[in-house]
Image (cartoon, grey):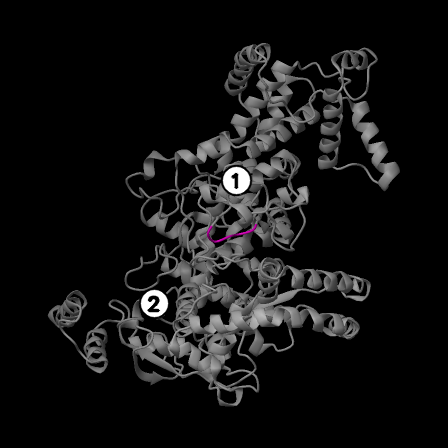
Amino acid sequence: MYKALYKPLALAIILALSGTAISLSAAEENKAVAKTQAAVTQGWAYQPLKNPELPAVKQKNWVHTPVDNFILAQLEAKNIKPSPDTDRASFIRRATLDTWGVIPTPEEVQAFVTDKSPKAYEKLVDRLLASTRYGERWGRRWLDLTRYADSDGFNADGTRPNVWRYRDYVIKAFNEDKPYNRFVQEQLAGDELFPGNQEALIATGFLRNYPDEVNARDLNLKQVEIATDLTDTVGSVFLATTVGCAACHNHKFDKISQKEYYQLQSFFVNASASDDILAATGKQKEEYELKQAKWEAATKDIRDKQEVLIRPIIDKAEADRLLGFVPATRESITKPENERTAYDRWIYHRNLWTMQGRTRNAVNQLKTKDKEGYEKYQKLEAELKKFDNIKPKHPGYISAMTELGHAEAPPTYVLANGIYDRHLEEVQPGFLSLLTSEKPNIVPTTTSSGRRTALANWLTSASNPLPARVFVNRVWAQYFGRGIVESVSDFGKMGTKPSHPELLDYLASNFIKEGWSVKKLNRQILLSNVYRQSSAEREDTKVADPTNKLLASFPRQRLDAEQIRDSLLLASGLLEEKLGGPSVLPPVPSNFNAGNAWVTSTDPHDYHRRSVYVFTRRNIPYPLLETFDMANPQLVHSKRDVTTTAPQALALINSDLVFQWSQALAGRVLREAGNNESAQIDRLYQILYARLPDKTEKATLLGFLDNQEKITKKQIAEGKKVGVPEGFGESPELRNNIDKLYKTAYGRSADRFEKIAFLEFLEKQKQAKPKSAQDDDADAGNTSTAKDDSQKLNKARAAAFLSLVHAAANSNEFSYRF
């Protein structure tokens, strides 16, 4: 038997290594591989789902949910005892980080620790899953899989101003516990399955998220590149199958022929991105269009005169642009509309993208080449602005994938060696034979081919075992650091085998049985005893289970990039809880040198939004998140890397931004704990670690304060500037006066940023005065410089305390989940 397997495999290796030395027809290669594959049993991942019976276990009182039966059965088979429960404070910190992506507050920890009711854990888990923070956390992990970014990538890396709506759709879907099968259907074919449903249309942003070279000159190649990206992404995300390996030849390990790859790709060839779909619907849309029509009628003469000025420039630019395309692309673009095929139509629509910004570019050319014409244009622009009072506010656009209002799809061909213009046989849409013998049921509509509907329905059908298996395995991996199948996006022969195959099938079958509810799946894992175990290291398992695959203890994990940033912001009291909206650009280091690619948001409240809302530019990631291994938006990011590098420590300790957060945290501790240093250290530990320090830790930290105070005193004496906790030295009277001023002027108290700006203004005013005037102000007890007499901390001690806080916030204990 093995010889029969090795002969075709050896032939495949020779072919792969020899390049063009040996040439077989596609049909001959298909036969050779089919013969090999026929001798191989269908892989475990492609077998129908089973609903296994719960294994019998000896330690029955350890079982909290059915999940525990499967874990405990394997432990008992190895004579390994599970670990005891972790303490309650550690549990709530662990569970809150896993479900919300941030640390819990000391008050939340205390409430859970002192809750003696028998349903304390259930109440905690239900509260966590009910919060909108849950959707922000789990939505971010789904975005890892979707190549989500706010820019195109490639050379231009232009901004995509509308894709945030897809991000918000994902967060909302998790918060509302949208059934996963519906979630999949909307993302693959929302425009076809649910016409008129704006949310479902936005969901197709999943497909739209591909990286793109907007100024590509070979649109024939671009059409294949996009279809390839969509095929590979769907295969990886929903099927955990490396279908992309079959783009150039039959898959060398899994039963996927090159022909089948292009049959799968055929589902997507009519899909085309649209970034200009009006976001308004119903009455809002009607009102907008009515007002817009009135504005257009009122300004027609002015705009026509502007058009006359810039039209020659636009015409020349478009003629030059057309010459820049390859001949095959030009042929499709220049065809009369009534002669265009479905393929030509795709190319022509894609060509329209390269015309974006043509008016702006023409005006810029007019400014440099025809000053008289530019002056006329500017006068007309001033006239146009007089009508701003009747111009409606634009509701914005949606970025989505549609089929351009036509049911006819371009042909799909098997490509020789994957080369885009070397067509072999034409193929029709079809599923992978290793999964099913079922044929797609494609029903075209008047505006779409119906192909993606057929694919979405098959992926979410009860007869397809893979999508549910794949998803529950991804969820498991988020909690335990690795999946039941460790290769979370490869369930094929080159992937790893499941450590607990019966548990995987139980979770998948129960997931479907429970209506594809993601929250119920999370709840079952969170309430299991395997999740509740201590993470303490155990000597007795190092030989029997050295990598902890059997989960005899809970695996410790380093927090990911978003958890670190968001938790630091929450600890400092700065985290802004606003939900959704356009992506924000917080400040970056002064040496970042991103130019116009990173223009900091004007609203300071945006600086401290959750990381899921931070602008994701493909070529210039946000530095702090990139340093801690954020998801790479260029591709399906199946599993976060966990690296330990020197730049990570330096980014936290030396970052001016992180230092400001530590100043805010130190100020918070002083306000909440008062002047007692022992109480201050207690409060700091409660905020950061959800525990109190032991005697040794407290003695060490107090000793650190004494030593550090000596250093800061010397620095102050030398005239060096030292950092102090936020609010240090400000009198309560001054803070109250600022609040009173804002209440009088605006009917509300000043927020943090306004107070800081006000105090900076007062300080500048003070510095601008002659020295004698400053002394007079101090003698008179001027409120702008008055100190809080009750605050006994001197400046040197305050600076030392800030150093302690900064070190504690950047420690391993803070950045790990135990």
Q: Which residue is drawn at 61% across and 15% down?
A: 797
Q: Residue furthest bottom?
A: 338
Q: In which quarter of the image is the N terminus?
A: bottom left
- The answer to which image quadrant residue 627 occupies is top left
Q: Residue at x 51, y 34 (%)?
A: 814
Q: Magenta part of the protein: which range?
A: 615-619
The answer to whether 271 appears left or right of 794 in the picture is left
Q: Residue at x 36, y 74 (%)?
A: 435
Q: Can residue 272 be seen in this view?
A: no
Q: In this view, does 452 lie above or below 587?
A: below
Q: Which residue lies furthest to the front in this view?
A: 372
- The answer to which image quadrant residue 447 occupies is bottom right
The image position of residue 149, as x and y in percent, is 51, 56
Which amino acid does the dot numbered 2 rest on? Answer: Gly
The image position of residue 111, as x and y in percent, is 66, 38
The image position of residue 51, as x and y in percent, is 43, 67
Which residue bears the numbered disc 2?
244
Q: Distance between the residues labelled 2 and 1?
A: 34 Å
Determine if the magenta segment contains residue 329: no
| Camera-nearest label, 2 or 1 | 2
| Secondary structure type for disc 2 | helix
Which amino acid does the dot numbered 1 rest on? Answer: Ile
Q: Is residue 428 visible?
A: yes
